[in-house]
Image (spheres, grey):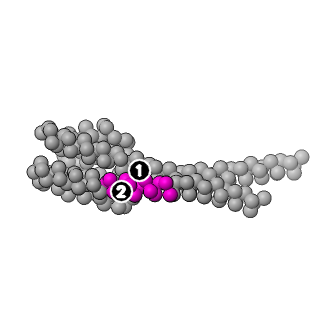
Amino acid sequence: YGGLVMIIIKYISLFLVFCISFYIGNLISKKYSLRLAELKDIKNALNIIESKIKFTYEPLPDIFMQTSKMVSKNISQIFVQASNNMQNDSAEEAWEQSIEIATTNLNEEDIENIKNFGKMLGKTDKEGQLSRIELTKTFIEMQIEKAKVEEQKNAKLYKTLGVVVGLAFVIILI
């Protein structure tokens, strides 16, 4: 009877090892699709900001706060934080600080491109800001294309790798 209990515990442990490995593989692969979604959200936010700057005379903190309500949570926090920071700091400093403390799935290259958006905020006329938005949108579109390629290539890889590593552990432990 004691041997049977040990065998059951062993197989349950092997099953848990496999499930954990599978879960980790899926978690890593999901980061690629989340990054892509966040980049699309940023592009959408830039479109909203561009329209508001073109057609309204609202202050930048208000535009950012309104924009935050139209994007996903991770990207929304960047705009809320930037809007709040603009009470005490310049628009550029507020933007940069909000990017640095945000929790996103973006990579370093994405973050650098997004930080560059803030360089001219509040410093130039309306046309200067609109051209900076256009430039940033161009960079974001390139990042979106890269993210699509990476997602197609790596998402399946990490899911498969999670399964293979889990099976390898199970085989080794049997």
Residue 100 on image: x %, y %: 32, 56
> Left or right: 30 with respect to 93?
right
Q: Secondary structure at mark 2?
A: helix
**Residue nearer the viewer, 42 or 62:** 42
Pointer 2 or 1: first along the chain: 1
- Amino acid type at circle 2 is Gln
Name the quadrant of the C terminus: bottom right
User: What count of labels does the image hold?
Assistant: 2
Q: Residue at the far left: name it.
A: 125
Please tell me which residue is depicted at 56% across the width and 51% down the height of the picture. Answer: 26
Q: Quadrant of residue 145?
A: bottom left
**Residue nearer the viewer, 6 or 41:** 41
**Residue nearer the viewer, 142 or 79:** 142
Please tell me which residue is depicted at 33% across the width and 57% down the height of the picture. Answer: 142
Residue 22 on image: x %, y %: 62, 52
- Amino acid type at circle 1 is Leu
Q: Secondary structure at mark 1?
A: helix
Q: Which residue carries the number 1 mark?
A: 36
Residue 67 on image: x %, y %: 27, 40
> Left or right: 123 with respect to 4?
left
Q: Is residue 129 visible?
A: yes
Q: Which residue carries the number 2 mark?
A: 143
Q: Give the extent of the magenta segment.
A: 140-153
**Residue 142 lies within the magenta run:** yes
Please tell me which residue is depicted at 30% across the width and 60% down the height of the picture. Answer: 112
Gap between marks 2 and 1 measured at Cα: 9 Å
